[in-house]
Image: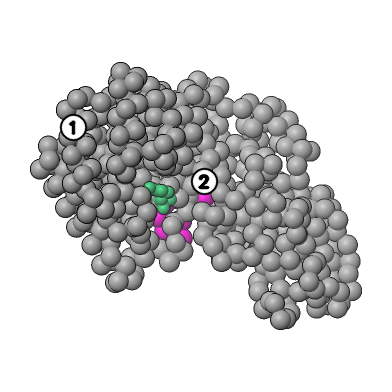
Amino acid sequence: MNLNAAPKWRITSEQGKRNYENACHTYPAQAIVDLKALRDNMAHMIDMVGGPHSGTAVMGVVKADAYGHGLVPTALAALAGGATWLGTAQSHEALVLRRAGIGSDRAHILTWLYNGEQVPADRLITNDIDISVGSLEGIDEIAAAARSVGKPARVHVKVDTGFGRNGFTPQIFDQALEKLEKYTAEGSIQVIGQWSHLAVADAPDNPDFVEATEMQIRTFNEFTARMEKAGVPPQIRHLANTAATFDRPDIHFELTRPGIGLYGYEPDPAMGEPSDWGITPAMTLQAQLGTVKDLEAGHGISYGRTYITEEDTSTAIMPLGYADGIHRSASGFNTAGARHQIHMGGPVRIMTSNGPRLVRVSGRVCMDQCILDLRGKASDLGVSEGDTVVLFGPGRGEAFAEPTADDWARAADTISYEIFTCLRNRIPRLYLNSDILPESDRAMLDPTTLL
Ligand SMILES: *Cc1c(COP(=O)(O)O)cnc(C)c1O
């Protein structure tokens, strides 16, 4: 390893240094998550809604293992930033948060994805987890569970205002209201919230989409009126995701539900860069190079010969592949054929003796690895086996040539959300700046993951 490729991490504790070395020995790639960035992103979004006393609370959406960042560490960082709510789609993850030690005195937790047949409603209710209801079967099941455990269920009524996913449609809502009235009267449920999800809030520059959002808001308000009339008014309403938390203060209501903003990304690059919104990407994905070797011009690279070296060059193995969650659609093709066209592969920052340089995945992404054409001789560049390269990180400007998850999303024709959530857990997650957490929270985390 040459000096320029030395990891930039400043790890102060001896334990942290050992953890870093162990992780590098265990696996040739690491996802490093900055807890301070997560905390600050949450604190910044709380400022955006007017501060902790504005009447609008902020939920840290930590579904899907906190978008791949790690459920419990992320949840604790969000709480350190002032979040008073956490949200997960799968009810299992809501239970994991409570089991980890995040009590109802610290955060409300809302969960929203289950079927009315198999929902572990009794455990959700006894663990003080708020439950979304969006189907008639769901209401019955939740109410029955509440009766059996002898404690009312806290429910949030999900309404479909145009997203076409979960929630009651206006047509069926009278039947839902009837059940809500009945179960409220008998004390088995408590209507806490009314909520819905926006389809196109991340495209403020598209008039059709803005109109679609307006329509969703009108429909949302009509649902509220119907709940009030039926005598089951919501105590809180929530509709805003990250996009609307950023740019629709008129619909913050009593709670907003940002997910991607917590992780430091805007929902869509059309909305600008993270720094435009005052947030910082929290995750860096790095890897240590395998074989570095010289190849002559005209040499095929990887399956399908979709990439042919254009000059005498060197290549390096990057030991992450589609089994790690690196999208095969981020393969790089410099030839066109019957089944492929020229396509820029995913970007990777390498360090050379002349400073940082961007190279790209060359040829098809394989199961455990991909190949980087260094476009130059490794010996001239000062690149060698074992060097640490960065797939994406906070993106510290041109000079650092550091790609972001948005760059990977572009290369893979997807969104940053999928870039993170696809990363398999065989890639060690390591946490920077855990000293932003109270000692008792740090104690909830796996000590071998802290830097
Ligand atoms: C994922 C999700 C969010 C967060 O969306 P972002 O675009 O990441 O802010 C909010 N609400 C619901 C219902 C979700 O499923």
Q: Secondary structure at mark 2?
A: helix
The answer to whether the residues at label 1 and label 2 have Cβ atoms under 8 Å apart is no
Crowd around label 2: few <14 · some 14–19 · many ≥20 (10 Å) = many
Q: Residue at x 72, y 50 (%)?
A: 287
Q: In the rendered view, how is the structure colored?
A: one colour
Q: Is residue 440 left or right of residue 232?
A: right
Amino acid type of disc 1? Lys
Query: Disc 1 versus disc 2: distance between alpha carbons?
Result: 38 Å
| Quadrant in the picture for residue 369 | bottom right
Beta carbon of the mark 2 residue lies under 8 A of ligand 1 = yes
- The residue at which mark 2 appears reads as 67
Magenta stretch contains residue 171: no
Residue visible at 32% across and 27% down?
A: 144
SS assignment for the magenta stretch, majority:
loop
The residue drawn where x is 29% and y is 42% is 136
**SS category of the residue bearing label 1:** helix
Q: Is 280 colored magenta in this rendering?
A: yes
Residue 451 horizontal/vertical position (percent): 64, 33
Q: Residue 328 placed where, x, y %?
A: 67, 62
Q: Nearer the viewer, residue 72 or 394?
A: 72
Foreground residue among 32 and 234: 234
- Disc number at residue 100? none
Q: Which tag is nearer the camera, tag 1 or tag 2?
A: 1
Image vertical order of residue 51 relative to residue 319, above or below: above
Q: Amino acid at mark 2?
A: Tyr
Residue range corresponding to the magenta coloring: 273-282
Residue 351 spot, x, y in % from top left: 73, 57
Q: Is residue 86 above or below residue 188?
A: below
| Mark 1 Cα-neighbour bin, 10 Å: few <14, some 14–19, many ≥20 | some
Which of the marked residues, 1 or 2, is nearer the chain's N terminus? 2
| Residue at the image point whose x is 30% and y is 71% from the top | 208
Which residue bears the numbered disc 1? 182
